[in-house]
Each structure stands twice: as structure tokens, then as C-alpha cells.
Image (spheres, rainbow, N blue to C red):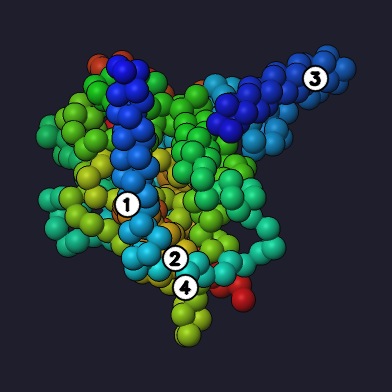
Amino acid sequence: MRRTAGKRLARGWIAGLLLGAATLCIPGVLFSDVAKPQIPSARGEQCVEPVEIMRRDHFDFMKHDRDTTVHEGVRSIKHSLAGCIDCHASRDTGGQFISINAEGQFCQTCHTYAAVKIDCFTCHAAVPATKVSQSP
Amino acid sequence: MSESEYSKSGSLRRRFFTQAGGGVALLALAPGVRLAELAIAASDDEPVSDKHRWGLWVDTSRCVDGCDKCVSACNEEHGLSGMDRPETDAQWIRKVDLQDEVTGRELSLPLMCQHCEEPPCVDVCPTGASFRREDGIVLVDKHICIGCRYCMMACPFHARAFIHEELSGQKTHSPRGKGVVESCTLCVHRVDEGRTPACVEACSNAGNDALVFGDLKDEEGRLALILDENEGVELRSDLELNTAVRYSEV
């Protein structure tokens, strides 16, 4: 008798949990009005790492390599912010580079979507170095 | 992933030591070859080492009163655009005019971070942002700096500046921004490429040659030879900081 009551209670809990989980999932699927980020196309053929890895780990790569450069003077690093900007900065109709952290640009478009505020560009240049911008 | 990155840099270090060992063997084979030259020829993916100590010689007798080519070259190189507020604008290098009260002798000299061997800014920094690279260049890691400005108070040369306002248009090789301290980097981005600092180049282009850049540890280098012949005055030598910037006849 007691065991049956226990089973009923457990079934109730599971049903409740399932219902709760389902309710939580609904808004994400049905009512999402956040558009996927439209990432501007880049120059060059291949990124320094596969795209999926870069999306997940780019900040770890950059943080590791920035310490190597700043403290040890190693300049031939693979993952540099300047490297990102060289390939991913877009130009406006007049041929001038647009800041990579401007709305809709490579860095900003994803970070707006992910609601992550980046402060790289309070110090770092957001357009390629002059040498690069002079070349076509 | 970061784990494998670290192990990769570990193997890099081992490779560096192996190469250094090869250098010694070569030295034994060819007596005319100096180890310093081998080190300079090494590729740029090796960490900087204490084989070098970069320094400056300032010949005050050649420094022209009223000339500020070094200052403008520094401003241009690092994009130090002033806010037209002399009290707080960043000055990585400034011209100082001195006059001896007794003899009346006048002197004009450039003053910048002296890249001390025992830097007071590094001693007082609570976060480790102020640091001295293995090759003697004293820098601020702006990623770690919290803008407390202890280093500015500790520096006897007033060499550091704090950025009070938001900046734009920074140079790729010289990131700088609001809320952190900065100072002369001895043009570390140029040094790592084997070039001389912008101020030295400008002084030389102007025909004054008052500034000489070089390796204090290279016994046959130009800087060491100059310091053999001249006294090489250390500013505030009473503090025993062993500065890398040396002056003539101050």
C-alpha cells in the first residue's frame, strides 16, 4: 500500500519535471526574435584554426599569446588580435576600413548576439595597420 | 586546448636550449664567431633573454637647445595625440633644460623612462603589471594594470603618464587607452624587429646624433665602446637603480 503511494508520488514528480522542462524550452524555439548574427565575410582562404574551435576558444588563444608577446617579446605568434583584424575588417563603399567593433562588424555582431561586452578596443586599434590598408 | 599550447611552448623552450648548445659548439669550431652575433641571428619565436640589455647613450653636448625632434618622433610613432592639456597629457619623452645655479652653464637633454635594472615602479606595483623584460626593457602590461598610479609616485624621473580620457585612432603596434599607466617602451616593437627606437632615428636623421641605442652587454658594440671612453652619468645615481639610459656631462 505504502509502496504504491510512493510510486504515484514519483510519477507525479517526473511528469511535473517533464512539463516544466517542456515549458522552459518553448519560448526559445517558438518566440525567439533574436536574429542569428550576420557575420561579414573575411579575406584569405583559411582561418588560423577551424571555425568551430575559433568560435569557442578564440579568447583563450588570444590571451595566451598576448602574454607571450608582451612579457617574452615573441612576435611570431599564431593567434594575434592584429591578425584577426587584418583578415576580418571590412571596408565601406569609399574603400576605408570600418572599425571591427562597429555595429554589424565581425567582432561586434557576435558579441551583441552573445551579450558579451569586449573592451579590447578601448586600447587596441580596430582597423588594420596603415601598411595593410595601403595595399589593395 | 590551452594545455597543449603550454606543452607546445615547453617544447619550444627545449628546442631553444638545444639550439643554444649548438651555438656553443659552433663557437668552439670557429673562434672568430661571437656568441652575441649568434643570439641576434636567432629567430623571433624565442623569448627574449638576458643575453642583451638594451640601453641608450645621450650625448648632451650634441643635444641642441630648442630641438624636439625626438619628442615629436615619439608622439608620431606611438600616436600620442595631446588633449591640449599639458598638466595631464602623456609625455613618454620630454626635453628638460637645466641651468647650473653657480656657473650658469646651460644644458638641454631628453628625459624618458630610464629602464632601471632595479625599477622602483616594478617594486611598488601591486598587480605585477609593471615588469622588466629579460632584456632590461621596463614595461606596463596594460591588461593587468588597474590604474592605481603607485608607479607614477615611485618613479624618480616622472617618466610615467596616466590616461584620463577615452582615446581613438591608436596604432596597432602601440595599444593605449583610458585608465592605465604608460611610459616609454624603448620602442619595444621596433627593438624586437632589430630596429632602433624612433627618437634615436629622428635625432640621427636631424644630424645631431645625440642619441645612441645599443646593447650594454655587447662588449664590442658601439654603446659599450662609448661608455668605455666616457663616464656615462646615471641620473639619480644615489638611488643605485643602474639605469640603462646614460648621459654625458650632466
Asked whether the residues under marks 4 and 3 belong to the same chain, the reply is no
Asked whether the residues under marks 3 and 2 belong to the same chain, the reply is no
Q: Which residue is mark 1?
A: A23
Question: Where residue B139 sits: x, y (%)?
Answer: 38, 34
Label 3 residue SS: helix
Q: Which residue is mark 4?
A: A97
| Chain for numbered disc 1 | A
Counting other residues with Cα less than 10 Å from the Cα at mark 3, is it few (<14), some (14-19), or many (20 or more)? Answer: few
Q: Pointers 3 and 2 in contact (CB under 8 A)?
A: no
Does label 1 or label 2 sit earlier along the sequence?
1
Of circles 1 and 2, which is in front? 1
Does label 4 or label 2 sit earlier along the sequence?
2
Is B21 placed left or right of B128 in the picture? right
The C terminus of chain B, quarter of image: top left
Q: Residue furthest front?
A: A1
Is B134 placed left or right of B114 in the picture? right
Q: Which residue is mark 2?
A: A36
Of circles 4 and 1, which is in front? 1
Residue at 31% across, 33% down: A13
The three-letter code of the residue at mark 4 reads Phe
Does label 4 or label 1 sit earlier along the sequence?
1
Asked whether the residues under marks 1 and 2 belong to the same chain, the reply is yes
Q: Which residue is mark 3?
A: B22
Label 2 residue SS: loop
| Chain for numbered disc 4 | A
Q: Quadrant of residue A105?
A: bottom left
Question: Where residue A98 sits: x, y (%)?
Answer: 43, 72
Label 4 residue SS: loop
